[in-house]
Amino acid sequence: MELNKQSSSEKNHRAVLVFLVLGILIGVLVGRGWTSAQTVSPMSAVASTSSTGSVLGLGQNPPVNAASQDVEFRMFWEVWQLLRSKYYKSTDVNDKQMFYGAVKGLTDSVGDPYTTFFEPKGAEAFKEALSGQFSGIGAEIGLRDGIITVIAPLPETPAEKAGLKAGDLVGKIDGKSTEGFSVEQAVSMIRGEKGTKVKLTVIHVNDKKKTAPIELEITRDQIQVKSVNLKWVDGQKGMARLEVTNFNTDTIDGLNKAIEEMQSKDVKSIILDLRNNPGGFLNTAAYMAGEWVGDKVVVKERRQGKIVEQLQGTGQNRLSGIPTVVLVNEGSASASEIVSGALQDYKAATIVGKKTFGKGSVQDYTNMKDGSAIKITIAEWLTPLERTINKTGLEPDLTIERTPEDYEKSLDPQLDRAIGILNGSATGTASGIPASAKR
């Protein structure tokens, strides 16, 4: 997931968001709050109007020094007027859509999938995703090597039940090729009303091996994500399994309730399951990491080669010293990688599973006056020991595969190894687990 600094007219505190894409919506983010809104003042001249809106400043000369000496900005307006006057279907030429398309072209031109312009509808969906409740199929998608890729299906959602898996390549949506698609284009086709269906043509990828394309028909539903689930491992005294599916608005409250229950039942060891967790708010990640590492630095922000900010843990350090294993896989991203990286750097836990997704860029998110928004990559984040995870992923201490056959047979060798590490029965345990855990 990527880190995004965001602005909003509703809240006035600063934010960092970790953005992956909440497949049926827009994006799961990691945030530290929202910065105050930055809006663009309208141009004084008024363009022609239409039933769908007006464009202000049409035909107006650009400000001095608005473009480099090698580009004549006036050409933009010349192309604009040529389209309006010569396109053979004049009724299809809409000033507002042309304007939004031009702005989107600006963000697309930098070649960064996380620098994005959202039209008002998309911006609203982006906010909706943060609440943990939405209508869709229940999967996060993103761009990897220019291909629409499933980051992770959410547990017990239509996507998971239909067989969608982390790492799947989405070749078609309702029969239309996704070649050249942006994430937003894919999202707009995948999301929809409860009860409607969408067909995805996907290729399963396992250890770089691709299967033949298959078509999955998925019925959309209302998705309610409960981000924290606490279970107790059968037959293991005091061993808790804390599943965190997202870092959403309900996560800190859910985490506090889970910790209170663990403390009341004298927890002896913890499995923190972050598999297929695409991320969420950064402040939530800092809070969670702080339950193990206190107020130590949990993530660093680097811009243009320099560390410009360090974020400390904000949790209450209630889980410090309790033997912990963190489970991760290819669908663990952003906030999940922040927590995992911090616990790994401080040897507060052993990381088990597969290499994580590798999402660690920082975005500034600004709401515009008309309801649209823009998200711009401005930095990258590093682990406390300044390891880069963006595009490379986080390497676990123990790499354990969970194959498609394991899934089909309801086998979980990653979880089994975590249990073995904590109860002392597993061989080849990694560093980071206190000696008291090996009993």
Image: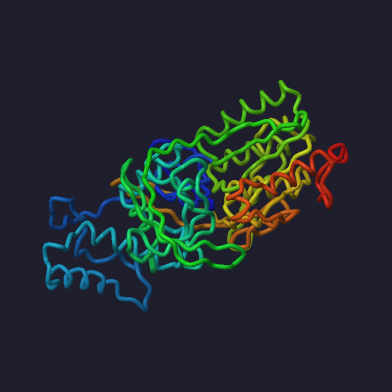
Q: Residue 139 at what x, y percent from top left? A: 46, 49
Residue visible at 81% across and 38% down? 423
Query: Above or below — where is 424 with respect to 165?
Result: above
Query: Above or below — where is 147 with respect to 281?
Result: below
Q: Residue 82 at what x, y percent from top left? A: 17, 73
Q: Quadrant of the C terminus?
A: top right
Image-based side of 185 in relation to 266, left or right: left
The residue lying toward the viewer, choosing from 186 and 335, is 186
Residue visible at 41% across and 65% down? 171
Say which quarter of the image contains residue 206.
bottom right
Query: Above or below — where is 293 with respect to 391?
Result: above
Residue visible at 57% across and 48% down? 276
Q: Residue 40 at what x, y percent from top left? A: 33, 51
Image-based side of 244 in relation to 195, left or right: right
Point out the residue furthest to the top here.
Answer: 264
Residue visible at 70% across and 49% down? 413
The residue lying toward the viewer, choosing from 169 and 274, is 169
